[in-house]
Amino acid sequence: MPEPPPFGLAEARGRVTLVAPQELSRRCREPRPPVVIFVGTSQDFARGHVPGAHWVPRGWREFQVGDLISSQGTPVAVTCADGRNATLAGATLRELGYQNVVVLEGGMAAWQAAGLPVEKGLTSVMRPPTDAILSGPDRNFADAIQYLRWETALGEKYATS
């Protein structure tokens, strides 16, 4: 059974401009290329992203975007693994006043299927990712509980009444 689309995806698609991988690749070579942000998980970012993209995790997007994008008129391209989170994030950026926002249709899956270059690893990540807890001898139950508390507080912070 296919996974149901995230809540609000259809509405978000109506508020953003979707671009094909080839079009985004062309725009990235222009004299004024867009700032490319990847809004998926750090693990998805490490698996592959548009070369030069910046990882902006969901919970920090509103806080970090101003550090990466100099003005609300700056071209911005939003990506993720499959295009769904990027579409929602693109709509949010439009609501925040960013005027020149495009979303990579189909996400990195479409980018890779088009045979375009992919950068791997945690390049351009300025601090250790906090969106996933990796298992291993240096992680314990307390780390997991702390992460879950952070995630719950984040959900409460953005809950609508």
Image (cartoon, helix red, strand yellow):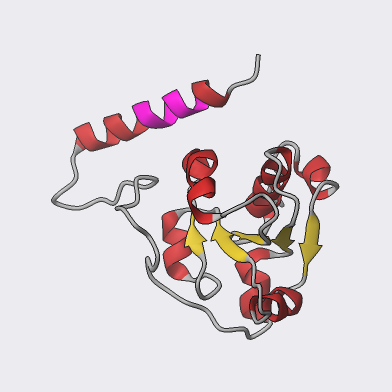
The image shows residue 156 at horizontal and vertical percentages of 51, 21
**Closer-to-camera residue (13/35):** 35
Residue 24 versus residue 134 in the image, above or below: below
**Is residue 33 toward the left or the right of residue 102 in the image?**
left
Please give left or right for residue 28 compared with residue 157 in the image. Answer: right
Q: Is residue 152 magenta?
A: yes
Residue placed most toward the observer, 61 or 58: 61
- The span picked out in magenta is 149-155
Whether residue 68 is situated above or below residue 94 in the rendered picture: below
Q: Residue at x 31, y 46 (%)?
A: 133
Q: Quadrant of residue 79?
A: bottom right
Vertical placement of 68 versus 30: above or below? above
- Asked if the magenta segment contains residue 29, the reply would be no
Side of 56 relative to 81 (left or right) = left
Q: Main secondary structure of the magenta part?
A: helix
Comparing 5 with 70, the one in front is 70
Is residue 4 something one can see in this rendering? no
| Relative image position of residue 119 (x, y in whole percent) | 47, 77
Most extreme residue toward the right is 14
Horizontal relation, residue 55 to residue 129: left or right: right
Residue 155 x/y as whole percent: 51, 27
Residue located at (53% from left, 44% from top): 61
- Asked if one can make out residue 58 in the rendered structure from this viewpoint, the answer is yes
| Residue 154, percent from left and from top | 46, 28
